[in-house]
Amino acid sequence: MAVRVVRTRAELREALTAAPRPLGLVTTLGALHQGHASLIERARTENATVVVTIFVNPTQFNEPADYERYPRTEDADVELCARAGADYVFIPAVDQIYPAGSDTVVRVGALTQKLEGAARPGHFEGVTTVVAILFGLARADRAYFGQKDAQQLLVIRRMAVDLAIGTDVVACPTLREADGLAMSSRNVLLTPEQRAAAPVLRRALLAARARYEAGDRYGESLRAAMRSVLATEPLAEPEYVSCADPETLRELAAFDGPALLSMAVRFGPVRLIDNEPLTA
């Protein structure tokens, strides 16, 4: 069947009442790209019904200007969803997610206090609250998230387990442009000069990976390798670089197991994140 767009809680509920199971869910902010398409395609191969949500969630933006600037490309997004195999696209207004009187916030603890959580206070409360609502509305069996947002993935998994939601949170690989830049809806906001500079994130991660593969197991050494590469690009303004435990996000000193390299870097007003898992 052709993809069907629904815009209200009632429409979604009615559409999914008799939908075959299992149901796969892909939650997005819109401005979809091939990375999102890969999540939808994965969901299509593993589920009888696939739902994509498109909602620019105001509660997860720390800066009002960033919320307003976020790209909105609904027609193109629906076309991408159709090509990738979605059955339904849920595009709600704000009052369909947060009806009048909404007064509940979902907060995960320690995992949200580090890295992105420290740099963007309240961000993860916005993420977990909206994702919990969307999980509940869709009653999803599986939900698909990209590894690029590694901390978000950990936080959502923790929430699903702790609240006994019953949705299996599936991690999918990061997709990259030919020059190594992780696909992101924010990439379109970069100027040509910033876009040319942005692959420095990937080069920095790979420099630290090379040290790791050569036997370096010191967190500060790997962080220094990333900072050194970032310093070669004048347009790059790092917010943080991290070499952390991949389960707790605690910064590592000497270590002998897996690790997660990650960073957030600004190019003017545009903030990009990326990461690289290291396995022993």
Image: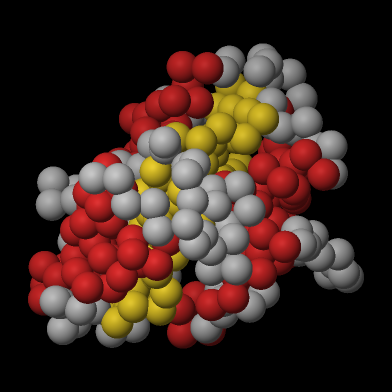
Query: Residue at coordinates 72% horizontally, 62% vertically from top-left?
Result: 110
- Is residue 59 in view? no
Q: Nearer the viewer, residue 116 or 217?
A: 217
- Is residue 115 in view? yes
Task: Relative to 252, say whether 237 is above or below.
Answer: below
User: Left or right: 253 with respect to 277?
Assistant: right
Task: Relative to 206, say whether 57 is above or below.
Answer: below
Task: Relative to 132, say whether 224 is above or below.
Answer: below
Instruction: Locate residue 146: give its quadrant.
Output: top left
Q: Nearer the viewer, residue 1 or 192?
A: 192
Split into 4 quadrants, where in the image is the C terminus?
Answer: top left
Query: Residue at coordinates 21% horizontally, 56% vertically from top-left?
Result: 207
Q: Position of residue 117 (x, y in %)?
A: 60, 70
Q: Position of residue 73 (x, y in %)?
A: 37, 58
Q: Nearer the viewer, residue 75 or 208?
A: 208
Q: Position of residue 174 (x, y in %)?
A: 36, 43
User: Left or right: 152 with respect to 182?
Assistant: right
Query: Residue at coordinates 69% horizontally, 26% vertically from top-left?
Result: 141
Name the image colouring. secondary structure
Task: Relative to 181, say whether 147 is above or below.
Answer: above
Q: Nearer the viewer, residue 159 or 232?
A: 232
Q: Position of residue 54 (x, y in %)?
A: 53, 51
Figure disc tally: 0
User: Left or right: 208 with respect to 101?
Assistant: left
Instruction: Locate residue 66: give its quadrant.
Output: bottom left
Query: Residue at coordinates 28% horizontally, 56% vertically from top-left?
Result: 208
